[in-house]
Amino acid sequence: MRSKNPRRRFLRQLETLSRNNCGRKLGFASMINNEVIDFADTLNRVATQPELILAMQRVLNRTGFEYFSLHFLPEPDQSFKEVVLLNHLPPGWLQLYIREDFARADPSIRHCHYTTSPFEYKDSPFDPILEPETLKVVQRASDFSISNGLVVPVAGLHGMVGGVWMGGGDAELDSRSNPLLHLLALYSFDQARHLAGVVVAKSVLTSRELEVLKWTASGNGAEEIGRILSISKRTVEWHLQIAMQKLGAKTRTHAVILAYRARLI
């Protein structure tokens, strides 16, 4: 049975990785009995975003990584500023990234839509000849010394919802350390989303999702909402499920309540 305690589940996974890597030269994995387990314990105790940033800095600095970013995947009509959860980045990079709308051409964000496996930033597929804007993003990242690192896609109930990038510094990635970084990224993203609560949900809910929630709050069923919005019942239900996931709601009624509290509808 899957443990309902995130820390216990995390520690069991770490113990398994430790046994599998026993006797090898581990690099990052060699700190498993100290920093990583401490980090797992810290996740349950951090109460603010600055505390989570400090906790991530401490553990990632031991791997050679200097920077990180946790974010939802932006919709076509959203700015990256609206979906970023938490970050520690070189001065000026986030401002430039948002001002130049780099998220629309960033190959790592695009690749997060198509894979559940972690990948190195440099391996994000794109064609430098046919995609000059994407090449510009990669080149500018190199100017800030952040064109290396690991990207961890984050899956939700209905597809990919976010990503975690960890990079900069002099980290050397290998197949033994990546599983541990993968776990750290996923649990950090989950905690960041929890700390942000419905404030984040306000940013990432699309106009259609808000519309569906509004009509649901008025007492309309999926079939009625479909007729009102000229979309299928199945599409209405899909929008509701995505909205519930983003709000962290367990039921449609719960989603409506959270939306009311956040003054979304």
Image (spheres, rainbow, N blue to C red):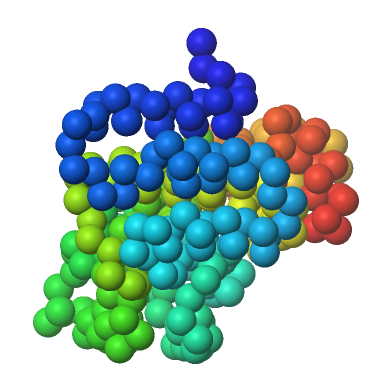
Residue located 31% across and 43% down the image: 30
Q: Which is more toward the observer, 249 or 57? A: 57
Q: Position of residue 189 (x, y in %)?
A: 53, 50
* Residue reaching furthest to the left: 129
Between residues 75 and 4, which one lies in front from this camera angle? 4
State which quadrant residue 182 falls in.
Answer: top left
Q: Is residue 31 placed above or below 71 in the rendered structure? A: above
Residue 235 position, x and y percent, is 55, 41
Q: Report the quarter where the C terminus lies.
A: bottom right
- Residue 67 lies, with reference to residue 7, above or below; the image says below
Q: Residue at x 28, y 70 (%)?
A: 170
At x 23% / y 82%, what residue is drawn? 135
| Residue 118 vs residue 33, the one in the foreground | 33
- Please determine whether, in this image, residue 180 is positioned above or below residue 64: above
Q: Give residue 167's position: percent from left, percent from top.
A: 35, 67
Task: Please name the residue shown 70% across and 43% down the image.
Answer: 45
Residue 111 in the image: state x and y as whole percent: 30, 58
Apparent side of residue 47 relative to residue 108 in the rendered image (left or right): right
Observer able to see residue 82: yes
